[in-house]
Amino acid sequence: MSTITARNWSNWSGFVRAEPKLVAAPTDAGELADLVRTAPGPLRVAGAGHSFTPLVASQGSIVSLEKIEGLVSHDVQSHRARVRAGTRLGPLMHILQGLGQGLPNMGDIDRQAIGGALGTATHGSGLTLGAYHTRLETVQIVDGRGELREFDRTRDQDMIHAMGVALGAFGILTEVTLNNIATYRLRRRKWVLPIADMLRDFEMMMAAHRSAEFYYIPFSGYAQFIASDLSDANPTTRPTDDDEAGLATLRKLSRGLRRLPWLRRSLIRGAVKKVPAEDYVQDWLNVYASDRQTKFNEMEYHLPFEEGPKVITQIIELTEKHFPEVYFPMEVRSVAPDMFWLSPFYKRLTCSIAIHHDAANDPEPFMRAAEPIFRRHGGRPHWGKMHSLKAADFKKLYPRWDDAMAVRRDIDPENRFVSPYMAGLFGIGR
């Protein structure tokens, strides 16, 4: 086991920082259990650091799962695979492809650890496609007493639903079994259209494809729509990913023409209208993810699906009237309902709206201004992205909140995994 004392820790964007007494990377569940029993508390667990909230921050111990990774076992008939919780999504895709399996859906970043993606309800897009946690069959954890425990969907359904979105507070994940599907191909298409047309036909366009999402480019009046559907065609060449070059152009226009908003809008609109359409077929693992190099901070709220167009309109108006420095596209997706107690998609079809701000800038004024809009329309925040909510707010948003908290107390009766930030989320006096 690797242990380092007094090492600073930060998340991917650099916005969240911590100075723990101990940073440790156990190599197996036994070493992890020893840490839970003996390391200075509170213990928080780190995956890839792609959360923008202080979920990992601790002045006690931060436990990295980077060495608890890889395939444990698989089943050919059921397309199930058991993997260790520190496995990154990028390597996991290739592992599954080699087994003839595929994740049914993904987000657009593949650097997260599967444990972190499960614990924060990370998701892709599609009206019939759930988030990663909906694929759980078994869960193995080390609980707050340092005991190894395992739960199975067939006999422990309530426990799986209670701790499927775990926030690193319902024990520390060590292994999970995922219900996958047979490997498949997707036809992915991208094209640009006026945002007014996109919002007018929102429900129809989001429902017309297996997976559909769009990005609105601020100050352009246009959206880039992305549709993915199953295909039996032979693979074709995936176009070069020009997202980073596009962001660089938007950043230059944002900084250089802030005092000439009419010219900035005209140039952005002209550039976006000229973005070429894309249409290609590839194996699933070569479609979902994009390379994200420009660092940002992010807020994402999950709303009742029918509220989507109204909220998008208000967020665009807010951005373009009051925050000219914002240039990152807004991302809009849909997610299927599920039954997991702390899932933002609990029992409702969801429209997810994500707003981003360059990590070089202070994101809080923009996020503070946008959050009331999301909240007025019944939004539930993404657990790993910026928000200001506390336990009293969550109790109103989640019908099974009290039940979930009872399970958490059973798993961690001495609050070994409860940092000051987590105490605020859960309403625990310290």
Image (cartoon, helix red, strand yellow):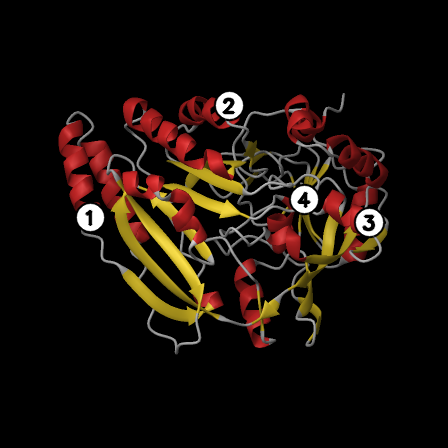
Which quadrant would the N terminus be assigned to in this image?
bottom right
Classify 10 Å Cα crowding around label 3: few (below 14), some (14-19), many (20 and above): some
Left or right, 382 with respect to 40, comes to: left
Label located before the other in sequence (2 or 3):
3
Mark nearest the camera among 3 and 4 is: 4
Return the residue at label 3: 34
Residue 14, visible in the rendered structure:
no
Classify 10 Å Cα crowding around label 4: few (below 14), some (14-19), many (20 and above): many
Label located before the other in sequence (3 or 4):
3
Return the residue at label 4: 165
- Give coordinates of residue 412: x percent, y percent: 82, 38
Classify 10 Å Cα crowding around label 1: few (below 14), some (14-19), many (20 and above): some
| Residue that appears at 56% across and 38% down | 382
Q: Secondary structure at mark 3?
A: helix
Residue reaching furthest bottom? 234
Tell me the kind of residue under disc 2: Arg
Tag 3 and tag 4, C-beta contact below 8 Å: no
Left or right, 191 with respect to 46, comes to: left
Residue 376: image tag? 2
- Give coordinates of residue 260: x percent, y percent: 15, 27
Tell me the kind of residue under disc 4: Val
- Comparing 400 with 8, the one in front is 400
Q: Secondary structure at mark 4?
A: loop
- Distance from disc 2 to disc 3, alpha carbons, whole Å, reads 45 Å
- Distance from disc 2 to disc 4, alpha carbons, whole Å, reads 24 Å
Tell me the kind of residue under disc 1: Lys
Tag 2 and tag 1, C-beta contact below 8 Å: no
Q: Is residue 220 above or below residue 397?
A: below
Return the residue at label 1: 273
Mark nearest the camera among 2 and 3 is: 2
Q: Secondary structure at mark 2?
A: helix
